[in-house]
Image: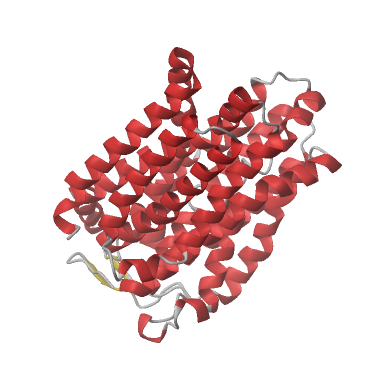
Amino acid sequence: MASSDHSSPDADPDGEGGEESTTPAPHRDGDLWLLFAVTLVAVGNVSSVAPAFPRVVDVFGISRVEVGWVVTAYSLPGILTAPLAGVLADRLGRKRVLVPTLFVFGVAGSACALARSFPVLLTLRVFQGAAAAPLVGLAVTIIGDRYEGTARATAVGYNATALSVGTATYPALGGALAAIAWFWPFALPLLALPVGAAVAWKLEAPSVDRAQTLADYLDVARDRLTDRRVLGLLGINLGVFILIFGAFLTYVPELLDERFGSPPVVAGLVLALASVSSGLVATQLGRLSTIVSQDRLIQLSLIIDGVALALMPLAPAPWGVGAASLLFGVAQGLNQPALQTRLTELASDASRGILLSLNGMILRLGQAIGPLLLGGVLVLGGVGALFFAAAGVAFLAAGGAVLVLGETAA
């Protein structure tokens, strides 16, 4: 594991036992499956409740614009809490932060199902979103602590597959629950409570080198956060998240409706195709990284992103958009686990939590500003111009990746 001159081995003060030398292969690691469960319960808390929005509008007597605050209230707190959780994980220990965060997420999230006024629902979503933001980053941080090299890339790829499974299944599950009653999709975070109990009881997070004092920690964190490769990776991922949330998830249904009159069920299937291909490709990241460097995979994925987005408005029928969606998913199956793996490699033990949590903050930023930025393009030039602009952003990001990572991509 990486270390820092400002760090010293911790005598396992929070019961986080386990050493990398005894860590089993990823597919046989029971603790790793617990981390997959953390990722699985943490994702989908927008897509799972979105099918209930029409009923939420009726139940609370609000407008279709106001219901958007259910998403905003969930997303914005993570911009602050994700990096804060990362600092605490570096200073106090990963498990000491992960367990209470899971319980806050589960209690506040499932309590949304009991809300009978819109302000109460929004307040609970704020607490849920604050706890949700660091969860995936904490899971990847512990994976980075446990593994190195190809095994690390394999494990992070598997975790990305767990995320893709969630993004593929939550919309359909939320729709089925919303058909029963508006509040049932909001009860899904209850799943985090048994996961939190299992993590508290079973997970052995490896002991890692930690900065001895706060001043030492700030020196370590500043050193990593001024590394142009780290800043470049975070900037690239912001662009990726803007494309995912601002173009793909938000406006593919609009494209299908405007061009082909496709019903929502077709849009849901097209979006799900990307999750399927993303999950399948992510399982192969470890194998691919033995052939092609992580940096080359990131650069290649951004080019694939641009091609897929440019093909969408050119598609002659919904099946063409579906094929482009599959291609878009391939890109995400490459770039998300590769970006996360590179961040874990560039971090020291003492700074891995903050770097991975900052990536969670970047996700929330992309989720918040992506639809606004590309929505402006839609107003000015229409849905076709929106996707061509998004493709341009992807190609620019690919160029930026060559500049930032080129010297290490050989």
Residue 304 % position (x, y)? 37, 46
Residue 153 % position (x, y)? 37, 67
Residue 116 % position (x, y)? 80, 33
Give the residue drawn at x 43%, y 67%. Answer: 284
Judged from this view, the residue extending furthest toward the bottom is 22
Q: Is residue 366 above or below residue 61?
A: below
Give the residue drawn at x 63%, y 41%. Answer: 47
Q: Is residue 338 above or below residue 63?
A: below
Is residue 226 at least partly visible in the picture? no
Taking depth in this image into account, of 319 and 144 the one nearest to the observer is: 319
Q: Is residue 144 above or below residue 49?
A: below
Query: Residue 380 vs residue 237: left or right?
Result: right
Give the residue drawn at x 48%, y 66%. Answer: 158
Query: Residue 32 vs residue 8: left or right?
Result: right
Taking depth in this image into account, of 369 and 203 the one nearest to the observer is: 369
Name the quarter where the C terminus is drawn: bottom left
How many numbered dots are placed on residues in this image? 0
Q: Is residue 311 above or below residue 288?
A: above
Is residue 380 at least partly visible in the picture? yes
Query: Residue 384 vs residue 30: left or right?
Result: left
Query: Residue 409 vs residue 117: left or right?
Result: left
Q: Quadrant of residue 7?
A: bottom left
Q: Quadrant of residue 92?
A: bottom left
Give the residue drawn at x 56%, y 61%. Answer: 38
